[in-house]
Amino acid sequence: MQRCCPGFSYAVVIIFVIALTSCLGKNSPGSGNQGVTSVTLSPASNASMEVGSTLVFSAAGRNANGGAVLGLNIQFVVGVPQGATGPAPLSIASNGNACAGTWDANVSICSPGSSGIATVQAVIEGVSSPITTVYVHQHIDRVQIANAATQTPQYDCFSQGQTWQFKGIAYDINNVDISNTVGPMSWSSSNPSVVTPLAMQSGDLNNPVFTVQTTAKSPGVTQLFATVSGTTSAAYPYMTCLIRYIRLQIGGQGSAGNSVTVNNGGTVTVTATAIDSLYNVVGGDSGPLSTPPLTWSTTNPEVAGFSTTTNTSGSNPAAARANLGGATLTASCSPPTCNIGIAGYQDPKTGQILPGLPIYASNGPLPNGTQGYGAISVDVTSTSPPPTYTAWAATGITPVAPTGGCGDAIGCSSALYAVNPAATNPISAIVTLPRTPNSMMFNHSSTARVYLGSDQGLMFVDVGASNPSATLISNSSIPCNVSLCGKVLTISNDGKLVVVADTVSTPSQVYIYNSTNANAAPIDLIIPGQTATAAAFSPDQLKLFIVTSTGNMYVYSTVDALSSVPIATSVTDLAFSPDGSFAYVAGDPAASISGYSTCSQTGFPTVKVGNSATSAVPLKIFPTVNVQANGPALIPPSSPPTPNGGQPSLVQNIIALEPPNLEILQAQFTQVPPPATTPLLQGGHSQLTCDPPAVSNPFISHVASFNLGQNNFTPIYTQLLADDTEVILVAQNIPAVLIFNVSNGTTTSVSLANSADPLAASASTDGSQVFVAACDQYDQTVNPPVCAVGSIHVIKINGGIGSDALQVPYVNNGNRNMCNNNGNPAPQCLPNMVAIQPK
C-alpha cells in the first residue's frame, strides 16, 4: 500500500523552505546579528499519526532578545524514546515533511510502516528544540469513554470540586484496543461550565496510559468527548450534582431573622448556603457548595438591589437607595448559569426532553444548625426628611379624557418636561417627542432613562443628560417589529429588558427590547388574535409571564420555548412572589387569585399551585415586601411527612383593589426540597423535574375588607407604598388623592386644587409626594366638554395628612399647548401622563 503526500501539504513545505532560504539574510531586522539561543518545533509536545499518513513539521529559531532569526539551516532529528528497541516508525525529510512509515527517494510517496513511538527534535546552530513525541498507530475505528478509577462511582453525579478519572479507549477496525499507541487525547465538554477536564498521562513512553481528571464545577449536565487523530468519541454523560435547596441569612447571622432595617445609602449583605443532591446521602461526602453560581434578586430595585446580580461567592451586598421603603431580597439557582444544561436535556429514564430547572430559596436549618430563610425583607429608612422628587410629564394618547395630543397628525410633536417642586421655575428640560406616547415608564434600577411607548414605535429619553432628547428605536415607524410599536407593559428588575405590547399590527405581537445591546434584534413573540394586557418578569429575570385579553397566559424564557396556558378571560393583573417561585394571577377565575409556578414540568410551562376566592374581582394586586418566615409548615399532599417538609412557611400579605373596596389577603407557601435520605440520581424525577412550591389550603385566606367610601370608581393609579403602610389611590372624577392606612383600615383624602379632574398620577416609594396630572378647567362650550387647562399637582403627604402644595401648568415661551408645530388639525395638548424619576 502506498500513499502520496497531499499536494497542499507539500506546497506548504515548499513555501516554508523558500522562506528559510530567502534573500532576507540570516537575521531579521533588528536582530543585532545575534545567534540562535532557543528553538521551537511545531507541532509541539505530542502528535498522533495513522500509519502511512504525513505531517509537516516546522521550526523557528530566536535570539537572546526573543527576535526571530531567519535563513537558517534546520535539521530534523528522529529517534525513539529512551529504552525503546527497534527503528523509529517515522521518517522525516530535510524540509520537515514527515511520513508515518518511509519515504521514497523523491520524498513523494509515503509507505506505511508499523505502529510505535518516535521522537522528533529540530536543531539549529547546535541548539535543540524540546522533543515532540509522535505516536504512530493503526487506523482508529472508534473511541469510547470509560471509568478509569479503581472504584465505580457510587452515584452518577459529582459534587462541586470532586475529581474523577475517565479514560478514552481507542479501537481499531478489528475491535482491538490500541489506546497505548495513539497518544494523549484532547478532552472537551458540551457545557464547559459544568466540568473542568485535565488530560493526564501515567506509565512510561513504552507503555503509556492516557486518562482525564475531571473536576465538577457548576451544577448541571454535560457530555464529555475525547478526540485523537481526528476521531471523536461518542458523547459520555456527566453531571455535577444539581442544587437541591438554598437558604439565606442576613450577613450569615442565623439569629438575625429574615428582616432588617437600614438607612438609605447603607448596605445589607445577604449570604446564601446552597446544598446539592448528595448532601447527607448515605455514602455521600459533599457539603455546601463553596462557589454556588447564584442569581440575586430584589422585588423593588428602586429601594434596594444588588449591583452584581450573579456571582459565585455565596454572598452579595445589596445597596439601599435614596428612595425610602422596602424590598425583598432573595437568591436562586437560575438557568442558564446554574443547573446548567437541564433545558433541552433528554432524561435517560423517561426519554423526555426537559425544561430548565430553577431552584428557589427556602426556609430551613443550615448545616451549622442556624436557621436559613427563603427571602430577606429590607426596610430602608432615613434620619433626614424625605428627598424632593422630580417628575416627568407628557401629553399622550389616553382614554381618560379628550386630551389625546398629536396622535398621527402630520407635523405635530408632543412634549415631555421635568417638574421639580424645589426649583424656582418648576418646569425645565422640555423635550420634543416626535411621536405621541401611549405609555411611559422609568427604568427601575437606575435614575437615568424613561421609556415611552407609541403606536409608531418605542422611544426613550436619558433624562440625566445635560440636554436630554428623545431617541427612537427606529427612525421609521414601519415595520412595527423594528420600531416596536405599542405600549410599554413592564421592565425587568435589572433594567435591561423592556416589554412592549403591539396592538397596531396583525397578528398581535409582544416585543422584548434589550437595552444593553442596541444592535441586537428585539425578540418578537407572536400572539395572534390577542392583546397582551399585563406582563411581569420573575425577580431573577428567568421567566416572563404575559396575560392576554382572550384567556391565555404566555410563558417566555431564554432557556425554554414560548408556551401558552389557558386561563380565564377575566384576568386583570399578575405579580411574582418574593422568592420568585410562582406568580399571583388576579381574576383567574373572576373573583379569585391563582398561583402559577415559575418552573416548568415536561409538557407544562407552568403548574397551577393553588387558587382562592376573593370578595370581588381584583383589578390590581400588590404583594407586600414584608414577608414573615415563621408560618406553619406546609407539605405537598402527595408527599409523606419528612424532616425537610417540616420547615416554617413564608407568609405574605396581598392588597387587592376591588372597587369600591380594598381587600387584605394572606398567602402561605414554601419550597420543599426532596428528602435527603434518598439518593438523587441522574434520571430521577425529583432531581431533574420542577417541584412546585407547596401552598396552604386555602392558598390565600381572607383577612379583611375595607370600603374606601367612594362608591364604585374607576382607578387611574393605585400603589402600595414600598413600606407596606399605605395605599395611594387616584380615580376618575374624584378630585382628590385617597390614602388608605393598611394597619387601621381608615381612608383619608387630599383634595386637588380647583377641584381638578385627575388624568394620571405617580407616587414616590415612601408616599411623601404624589404628582397628579389633572384637568383644571373644562371648556363647556363644546359637547362633550374638552379640557382647556391642565397642570401637574404636587401633593405632599406626611402621616396620612397632606395638601395640594403646588400646581404646575405647562408653559413654554408663553404657550400653554404641549404640542409643538400644532399639525393639521391643530390639537390641544395637555399633560395627561406623569412618572416620578427614581432617586
Image (cartoon, grey):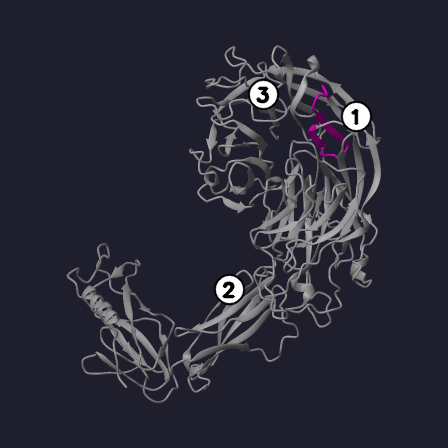
Left/right placement of residue 334 relative to residue 196 reads: right
Which residue is tagged 3? 403
Identify residue type, mark 3: Thr
What range of the chain is rendered magenta? 715-736
Identify residue type, mark 2: Ser
Q: Secondary structure at mark 3?
A: loop
**Disc 3 from disc 2: Cα separation:** 58 Å
Residue 135, visible in the rendered structure: yes
Q: Is residue 828 above or below residue 286?
A: above
Residue 690 drawn at (x, y percent): 67, 58
Which residue is tagged 2? 190
Residue 235 drawn at (x, y percent): 51, 71
Q: Which mark is residue 417?
A: none
Residue 534 drawn at (x, y percent): 63, 39
- Closest to the observer: 211 or 221? 221
Q: Residues within 10 Å of mark 3 (few under 14, many from 20)?
A: many
Q: Residues within 10 Å of mark 2 (few under 14, many from 20)?
A: some
**Disc 1 from disc 3: Cα separation:** 26 Å
Left/right placement of residue 18 relative to residue 651 reads: left
Q: Contact, CB < 8 Å: mark 1 with mark 3?
A: no
Question: N-terminal of the two: label 3 or label 2?
Answer: 2
> Is-magenta flag for residue 734?
yes
Q: Residue furthest bottom?
A: 86
Q: Quadrant of residue 399?
A: top right
**Disc 2 from disc 1: Cα separation:** 62 Å
Question: N-terminal of the two: label 2 or label 1?
Answer: 2
> In which quadrant is the N terminus drawn?
bottom left
Which residue is tagged 1? 711
- Residue at the image position 49 percent from the left and 73 percent from the top: 234
> Is-magenta flag for residue 433?
no
- Closest to the observer: 196 or 754? 754
Question: N-terminal of the two: label 1 or label 3?
Answer: 3
